[in-house]
Amino acid sequence: MITKHDHAESCNHHHHAGHHHHGIESHMHDDALVCSGNRDIIGDLETIKQNLVGEIEILTRWIEEMSGIIGHVKALVECDAPVTMISTTGVDITVKEMVGSTVQISIVAIVFNTNAQSLECRIAGLFDAL
């Protein structure tokens, strides 16, 4: 069964019963909620990094507004840039640098006093904003 939940105002994703965002997982460790996710994004590395900083700031404010306590929020940005394409039509070989490459983003949030489903929604929204 697919349901739409509305427990977080920015979460408009559809989910199968059990509530899980693709690529985002949560579990409890002692009293802390550990929420992590990964996403591949195609685009300019510098733009993605700048946007990610802003989105982490928004996530931080949201956690504080929900009376959560941040253990830490970390993001890892990996990129296999520059991407070079080598091609031929059988006559000449062309070597071209490709603008916009795949950037892998990993996020881990360790938070106290926060709802897992809401945090998963916020992280999904963060990825979508990039």
Image (cartoon, helix red, strand yellow):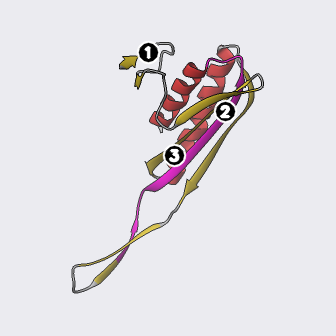
Q: Which residues are magenta?
A: 95-115
Mark in the foreground, 2 or 3: 2
Magenta stretch: includes residue 37? no
**Helix, strand or loop under label 1:** loop
- Of the residues shown, which amino acid type is indicated by label 3? Ile
Q: Position of residue 126 (x, y in %)?
A: 52, 32
Magenta stretch: includes residue 96? yes
Residue at left offset 50%, top offset 52%: 103
CB contact under 8 Å: marks 1 and 2:
no
* Residue position marked by numbered label 2 in the rendering: 109
Q: Position of residue 28 (x, y in %)?
A: 69, 26
Badge 2 crowding class, 10 Å Cα cut-off, few under 14, some 14 to 19, many 20 or more, is: many
26, above or below 79, in the image: above
Q: Does residue 32 appear left or right of residue 97 in this picture?
A: right
* Residue position marked by numbered label 1 in the rendering: 5
Residue 48 marker: 3
Q: Position of residue 124 (x, y in %)?
A: 50, 31
- Disc 2 to disc 3, how far (Cα)? 19 Å
